Image (spheres, rainbow, N blue to C red):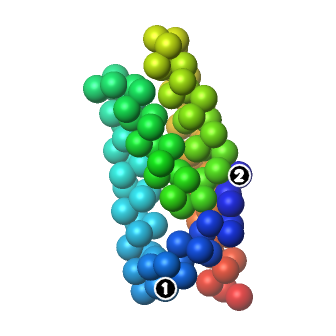
């Protein structure tokens, strides 16, 4: 679900001191984009593309794959299961934060 090698790579790129800020910003922006997607504000395809990019940047691999699949569907005017995306984000966020907690406790 989480590509930890990408998480570690990002941590090295931005430095440990800025990593928490990047994570907080990511979680906030993804939550806002999910709200816009859920309320049908704007283009579903654009929201899904944004979410996919965010997910890839922080190693949320499963979420990125799901967003990519639904992005293609939205481009073809097919329905998007927003609840599946939200559930995937919630599971991914949980695993991610749990993994970070273990990492900082070690």
In the displayed structure, 70 sits above or below 10; it is: above
Q: Identify the mark nearer the N-term, 2 or 1.
A: 2
In the displayed structure, 35 sits above or below 89; it is: above
Mark yes or no: residue 98 visible: no
Measured from the top left, where is residue 1 in percent x and y?
71, 52
Residue pictured at 43% horizontal, 57% vertical: 27
Q: Nearer the viewer, residue 35 or 6?
A: 6
Q: Image quadrant of residue 81? A: top right
Mark yes or no: residue 56 visible: yes
Which image quarter holds the C terminus?
bottom right
For label 1, the SS is helix
Q: Is residue 67 left or right of residue 106?
A: left
- Please report contact status of discs 2 and 1: CB closer than 8 Å, yes or no: no
Instruction: Report which residue position mark 2 lands on.
Output: 1
Q: What's the mark number on residue 39?
A: none
In the displayed structure, 40 sits above or below 99; it is: above
Q: Nearer the viewer, residue 34 or 53?
A: 53
Q: Nearer the viewer, residue 48 or 29?
A: 48
Measured from the top left, where is residue 48 in percent x and y?
45, 34
Residue pictured at 42% horizontal, 48% vertical: 30
Instruction: Report which residue position mark 1 lands on.
Output: 16
For label 2, the SS is loop
Specify few, some or many for label 2: CA neighbours under 10 Å numbering under 14, 14-19, or 20 or more. Answer: some
Q: Return the residue found at the far left.
A: 42
Measured from the top left, where is residue 74 in percent x and y?
48, 20
Q: Is residue 2 left or right of residue 49?
A: right
In the displayed structure, 13 sits above or below 96; it is: below
Residue pictured at 33% horizontal, 25% vertical: 43
| Real-space Cα separation, disc 2 to disc 1, in angstroms | 23 Å
Measured from the top left, where is residue 102 in percent x and y?
69, 77
Specify few, some or many for label 1: CA neighbours under 10 Å numbering under 14, 14-19, or 20 or more. Answer: few
């Amino acid at each position: 679900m989480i590509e930890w090698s990408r998480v570690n790579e990002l941590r090295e790129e931005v430095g440990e001191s800025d990593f928490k800020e990047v994570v907080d910003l990511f979680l906030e922006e993804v939550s806002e984009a999910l709200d816009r997607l859920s309320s049908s504000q704007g283009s579903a395809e654009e929201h899904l593309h944004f979410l996919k990019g965010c997910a890839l940047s922080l190693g949320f691999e499963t979420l990125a794959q799901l967003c990519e699949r639904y992005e293609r569907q939205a481009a073809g005017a097919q329905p998007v299961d927003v609840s599946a995306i939200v559930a995937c984000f919630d599971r991914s966020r949980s695993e991610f934060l749990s993994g970070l907690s273990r990492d900082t406790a070690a």
